């Protein structure tokens, strides 16, 4: 194993962004070159992340590809990076979706292309950095840094309400992060270090755990988002250009769930047990509330945004079942949801870009004009519902297995996402794709182009792969989850939950 591989995956996008930023020439030449540099850089980074996946040994406990260097040694802060089975797949998700976002934005982003590609590559660096950070200060730096390219891509290249959406996204996330900073400072004051593996071994008093976990829940609950901290989501997802929406919903929201797992369930097990009933309740509320609101939408993109919110409620439930099955299901659901929701947003973009409207009422019989889109769209709609044979089914089934150990009603209500999802997704699909061939905008539609297929086909293959052969993913992170949950301190903290379930 070569630790430098992880540094290359983390900072190559930053190098590509710098190369694009320094380009000179005519505006047309710079735009074309920016797209190609961003594409090849992101493809190279994805290839290197696949190499890391191939060399990673899931049976080795602890972190691999570790790099550590002095940063502020006198304060107990260091540059410490590495990955375990959990963080590896989120790094892969980030590097997989970035080139798809570059290709997806080839035609969709037409102004200030160079700046957009710079922002996209910067976002990739910050995402890989936060998933691989093993120092809490380093994690905080990368976590906050995602705000800069994320809010810029919404505010500069978004829709009519882009400035308001960008401000909401920035203020909600930044405000939540302040609570994480307070928790970070408290932990540093008590232990003298911000090293995450060291903090995992620190035994905080139960009362202090509750205060620390509350800070992290408020910080990561905004990014997830956890009900009722979701007010920024519909506008941000709807107003952002589709490649940005794909990165926000596909990866950035997973940073919140990853943080809740890493710095909540696994670091503060006593507090997690006390918080579990409340978070489980909020997760169930999100599942049902977002599904009902989604059914009332007339904008296709906004409907998919609420669908994403509903599924993030399932993930919150899985994490706070505090069982290996539930946590495995939550991680699997995060990965499959990242791919599926990205594909759904690009399916909507393929239609709305041609018709110049996202109103559901404007469409009828699109399948007659775009049969390839209709076929792929059906796959992603079924996957979003949780059809067996797709990745989402595996994730939701494992979450329900974990939830049934805690409460039948929690499992039942969380599982209702499959039924409610089927209602609003099939209603959307029927209204847009079926019916008599539409006139007006629909009559002018043409089927998917090569670049659009280059985005949707890989998503389709991964969705089916995760559903048909889930072991290829589960074997990577399941040992890390089981090892973390079976730690003596965690077992002791979670014992009352297991006894109550039995």
Image (tube, rainbow, N blue to C red):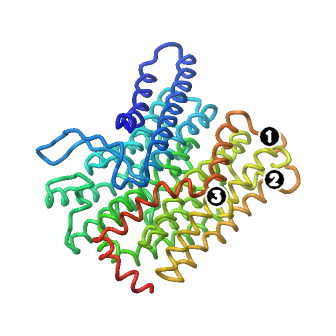
Residue 394 vs residue 205: left or right? right
Q: Which mark is residue 364?
A: 2
Badge 2 marks a residue whose secondary structure is loop
In this picture, residue 78 sits left or right of residue 275: left
Crowd class of label 3 (few under 14; some 14 to 19; many from 20; radius 10 Å): many
Label 2: how many residues lie within 10 Å, few (<14), some (14-19) or many (20+)? many
Image quarter where the N terminus lies is top left
Task: Specify few, some or many for label 1: CA neighbours under 10 Å numbering under 14, 14-19, or 20 or more.
Answer: some
- Whether residues under marks 2 and 3 lie with C-beta atoms below 8 angstroms apart, the answer is no
Q: What separation in Å lies between label 2 and label 3 (alpha carbons)?
A: 31 Å
Q: Nearer the viewer, residue 305 or 501?
A: 501
Where residue 485 appears, as percent x and y from the top left, is 37, 68
Tell me the element at label 3.
helix
The residue that appears at 31% across and 71% down in the rendered structure is 490
Residue drawn 42% across and 36% down? 9
Q: Which residue is mark 1?
A: 445
User: Relative to residue 141, is residue 249 drawn left or right?
Assistant: right
Q: Is residue 14 above or below residue 299?
A: above
Mark nearer the viewer, 1 or 3:
3
Earlier in the chain: of badge 2 and badge 1, it is 2
Q: Give the Cα distance between marks 1 and 3.
A: 32 Å
**Which quarter of the image is occupied by the C terminus?**
bottom left
Tally the numbered discs: 3
The percent position of residue 102, horizontal first and vertical second, equals 56, 34
Viewer-side label of 2, 3: 3
Report the Cα–Cα distance between label 2 and label 1: 12 Å
Q: Residue furthest top?
A: 25
| Mark identifier at residue 467 | 3
At 56% from the left edge and 77% from the top edge, which residue is drawn?
413
């Amino acid at each position: 194993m070569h630790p430098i591989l992880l540094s290359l995956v983390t900072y190559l996008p930053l190098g590509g962004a710098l190369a694009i930023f320094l380009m000179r020439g005519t505006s047309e030449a710079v735009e074309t070159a920016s797209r190609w540099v961003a594409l090849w850089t992101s493809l190279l980074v994805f290839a290197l992340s696949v190499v890391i996946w191939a060399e990673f040994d899931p049976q080795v406990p602890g972190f691999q590809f570790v790099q550590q260097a002095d940063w502020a040694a006198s304060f107990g802060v260091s540059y410490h990076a590495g990955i375990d089975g959990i963080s590896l797949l989120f790094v892969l998700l980030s590097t997989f979706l970035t080139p798809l976002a570059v290709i997806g934005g080839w035609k969709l982003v037409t102004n200030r292309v160079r700046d957009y590609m710079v922002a996209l590559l910067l976002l990739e660096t910050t995402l890989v950095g936060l998933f691989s950070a093993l120092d809490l200060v380093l994690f905080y730096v990368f976590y906050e840094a995602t705000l800069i390219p994320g809010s810029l891509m919404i505010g500069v290249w978004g829709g009519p309400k882009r400035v308001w959406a960008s401000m909401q996204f920035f203020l909600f996330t930044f405000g939540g992060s302040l609570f994480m900073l307070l928790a970070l400072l408290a932990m540093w004051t008590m232990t003298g270090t911000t090293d995450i593996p060291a903090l995992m071994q620190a035994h905080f008093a139960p009362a202090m755990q509750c205060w620390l976990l509350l800070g992290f829940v408020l910080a990561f609950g905004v990014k997830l988002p956890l009900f009722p901290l979701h007010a920024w989501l519909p506008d941000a997802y709807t107003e952002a250009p589709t490649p940005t929406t794909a990165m926000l919903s596909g990866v950035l929201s997973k940073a919140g769930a990853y943080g809740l797992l890493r710095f909540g369930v696994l670091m503060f097990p006593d507090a997690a047990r006390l918080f579990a009933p409340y978070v489980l309740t909020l997760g169930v509320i999100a599942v049902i509330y977002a599904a009902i609101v989604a059914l009332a939408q007339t904008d296709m993109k906004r409907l998919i945004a609420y669908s994403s919110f509903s599924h993030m409620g399932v993930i919150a439930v899985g994490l706070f079942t505090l069982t290996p099955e539930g946590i495995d299901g939550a991680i699997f659901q995060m990965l499959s949801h990242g791919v599926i929701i990205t594909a759904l947003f690009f399916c909507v973009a393929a239609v709305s870009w041609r018709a110049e409207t996202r109103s559901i009422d404007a469409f009828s019989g699109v399948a007659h004009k775009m049969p390839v889109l209709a076929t792929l769209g059906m796959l992603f709609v079924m996957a979003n519902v949780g059809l067996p044979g797709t990745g989402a089914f595996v994730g939701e089934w494992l979450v329900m297995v974990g939830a049934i150990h805690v409460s039948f009603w929690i499992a039942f209500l969380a599982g209702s996402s499959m039924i409610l999802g089927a209602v609003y997704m099939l209603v959307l699909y029927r209204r847009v794709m079926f019916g008599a061939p539409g006139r007006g905008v629909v009559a002018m539609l043409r089927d998917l182009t090569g670049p659009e297929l280059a985005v949707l086909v890989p998503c389709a293959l991964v969705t089916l792969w995760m559903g048909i052969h889930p072991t290829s993913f589960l074997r990577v992170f399941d040992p890390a989850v089981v090892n973390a949950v079976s730690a003596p301190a965690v077992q002791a903290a979670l014992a009352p939950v297991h006894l109550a379930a039995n």
